[in-house]
């Protein structure tokens, strides 16, 4: 097996084995502006020297193990090695086959003592070194590192503490100890490896990186936690070196700022389905049970098969229940439609089943303001926080001002912790834009034109709340919607314009 074939595999951009060139090119893409050429920032003699460096980096193999990462961090002066601002232990690599079919056998790794710790595999900008091998076996390699007390080292230390960086390493396979695995035969008869088994290799440097090189300059959803920490460092102006500051700002300026808004053509259907969902909860039953009627009649405690009328008399066995009796068999979360509507009007959110998406949304909504304040976002006396969107692993919350027409929105990651939803990571500031698709509005637009905005608004609201009163604010929202439908060429509109801020 020739080394050139493995390097071609790394250049393909299909796996976690990559060359060092994409990491350097990513830096070049972020270093825009006056006086920001790579040659100057990285202390090179000329632009040709940077070009040559990229060519050399394209021959160097790297690997960023998704199962690796920083395990523990020490920053107390008494615990630090000499000249260090941060010592940490990290899983350099594991022997697990990655999602691309590659395996790097950790028991066969030869680590050079005192090998440099680099930033983004930039060979001429060491930020520290490896201190020792903590553990090496056929499962993983764990090493101890020291980050130097330099301008770039201090920035790297901050990002490491914030969870913004991952581990990668440069390696060279030992001839005769790597081979193709899971070979695929192409239509022309050529053999293409689906992965490589690296049985023995020499590891000559370790790096801290923001995202795997083959992810390019686009921030992938998988790395949102790291990206969020980097953006926080930019917003709070925590970075001091020019290299780190320009790199982080480049990622920040190119971040995803907009999220798709509501598809108003589906609004009526959504509200109708909301009503049906609540009614289905009210009439929920198990095999052998009668429907739990929406009048929430108490179940008979004597026979458990019948329901009692207003006098307390069971319609099945005739037993009369005490006046103070309650429904013994009806689950606590089954509520009448009227009761659910009352809760919605009082608290702004409908009733929900434990463990449902709605219950997650309510729990996150209650925690949003405290979490923002705990993570450096000030909520003033005339401001409030509202949750406007919940996704599978993130939520969008907005801070609004009662007195001013202002809004600041943040994306918060969340996960289930001990069966309960909880926010994680740093808030990431985002901008919101609602996307209105003309085709989706055709049917609803025809109804609004035919019925009029007020009548259509009443119809929408009554779909969910039969006796609901239409507020002036709701009329304003629907009138705005009607205006948009009358002008279908408008493709995007700020969310604040739709809902009055």
Image (cartoon, rainbow, N blue to C red):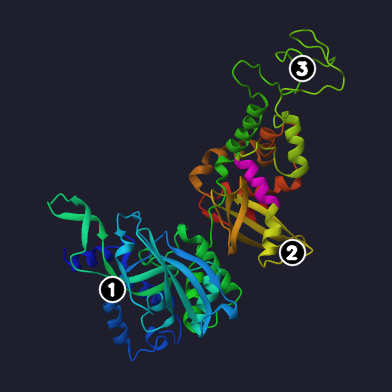
Residue at point 76% right, 60% down?
Answer: 402
Q: With 66 as the anchor, is 19 left or right in this view?
A: left
- Local SS, label 2: loop
The answer for how far apart the CA atoms under marks 2 and 3 are is 56 Å
Residue 360 within the segment the image draws in magenta: yes
Is residue 414 magenta-colored? no
State whether residue 373 is above or below residue 34.
above
Please tell me how crowded label 3 is: few (under 14), some (14-19), or many (20+) other residues with Cα within 10 Å: some
Rounded to the nearest angstrom, the CA distance separating label 2 from label 1 is 55 Å
Q: Circle 1: is it few (<14), some (14-19), or many (20+) Cα within 10 Å? A: some
Check whether the beta carbons of the residues at disc 2 and disc 1 lie within 8 A of each other: no
Residue 500 visible in the shown view: no
Foreground: 313 or 178?
178
Q: Which residue sits furthest right?
A: 323
Q: Quadrant of the N terminus?
A: bottom left
Q: Nearer the viewer, residue 196 or 252?
A: 196
Specify the segment rendered in magenta: 357-366
- Residue at position x 39%, y 89% in the image: 43
Farthest residue, direction top: 317
Question: Which residue is denoted by mark 2 in the rendering?
Answer: 404
The answer to which of marks 2 and 3 sits earlier in the sequence is 3
* Mark sitting on residue 483: none
- Pointer 1 or 3: first along the chain: 1
The image quadrant where one finds the C terminus is bottom right
In the rendered view, tell whether residue 89 sits above or below residue 473.
Answer: below
Q: Are marks 2 and 3 in contact (CB under 8 Å)?
A: no
Q: Which residue is mark 3?
A: 301
Residue that label 1 marks = 60
Whether residue 480 is visible here, answered yes or no, is: yes
Where is residue 453? Give x, y as percent. 66, 41
Q: Nearer the viewer, mark 2 or mark 1?
A: 1
């Amino acid at each position: 097996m020739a080394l050139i074939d493995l390097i071609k595999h790394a250049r393909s951009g299909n796996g976690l084995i990559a060359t060092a060139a994409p990491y350097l090119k990513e830096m070049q893409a972020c270093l825009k502006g006056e006086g920001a050429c790579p040659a100057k920032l990285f202390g090179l003699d000329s632009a040709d020297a940077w070009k040559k460096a990229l060519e050399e980096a394209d021959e160097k193999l790297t690997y960023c193990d998704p199962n690796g990462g920083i395990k523990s961090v020490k920053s107390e002066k008494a615990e630090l090695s000499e000249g260090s601002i941060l010592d940490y232990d990290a899983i350099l690599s594991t022997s697990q086959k990655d999602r691309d079919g590659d395996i790097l056998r950790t028991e066969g790794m030869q680590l050079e003592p005192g090998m440099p710790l680099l930033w983004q595999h930039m060979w001429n900008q060491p930020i520290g070194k490896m201190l020792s091998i903590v553990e090496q076996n056929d499962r993983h390699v764990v090493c101890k590192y020291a980050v130097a007390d330099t301008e770039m080292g201090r920035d790297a230390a901050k990002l490491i503490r914030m969870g913004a960086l991952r581990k990668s390493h440069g390696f060279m396979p030992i001839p005769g100890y790597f081979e193709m695995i899971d070979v695929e035969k192409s239509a022309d008869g050529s053999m293409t490896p689906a992965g490589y088994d690296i049985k023995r290799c020499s590891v000559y440097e370790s790096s801290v990186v923001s995202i795997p090189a083959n992810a390019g300059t686009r921030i992938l959803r998988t790395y949102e936690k790291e990206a969020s920490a980097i953006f926080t460092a930019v917003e709070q102006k925590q970075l001091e070196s020019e290299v780190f500051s320009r790199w982080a700002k480049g990622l920040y300026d190119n971040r995803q700022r907009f999220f798709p808004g509501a598809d108003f053509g589906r609004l009526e259907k959504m509200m109708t389905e909301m009503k049906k969902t609540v009614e289905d909860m009210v009439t929920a039953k198990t095999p052998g049970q009668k429907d739990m009627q929406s009048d929430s009649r108490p179940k008979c405690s004597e026979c458990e098969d019948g329901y009692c009328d207003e006098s307390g008399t069971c319609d099945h066995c005739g037993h009369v229940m005490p006046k103070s009796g309650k429904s013994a068999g009806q689950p606590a979360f089954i509520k009448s439609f009227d009761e659910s509507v009352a809760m919605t009007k009082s608290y702004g959110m409908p009733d929900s089943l434990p463990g449902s998406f709605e219950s997650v949304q309510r729990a996150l909504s209650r925690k949003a303001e405290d979490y923002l304040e705990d993570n450096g976002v000030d909520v003033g006396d005339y401001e409030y926080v509202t949750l406007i969107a919940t996704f599978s692993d993130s939520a969008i919350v907005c801070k609004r001002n009662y007195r001013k027409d202002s809004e600041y929105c943040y994306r918060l990651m969340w996960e289930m912790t001990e069966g309960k939803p909880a926010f994680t990571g740093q808030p990431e500031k985002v901008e919101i834009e609602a996307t209105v698709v003309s085709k989706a509005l055709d049917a609803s637009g025809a109804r609004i034109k035919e019925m009029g905005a007020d009548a259509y608004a009443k119809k929408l609201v009554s779909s969910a709340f039969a006796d609901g009163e239409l507020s002036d604010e709701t009329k304003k929202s629907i009138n705005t919607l009607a205006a948009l439908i009358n002008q279908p060429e408008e493709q995007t509109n700020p969310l604040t314009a739709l809902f009055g801020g």
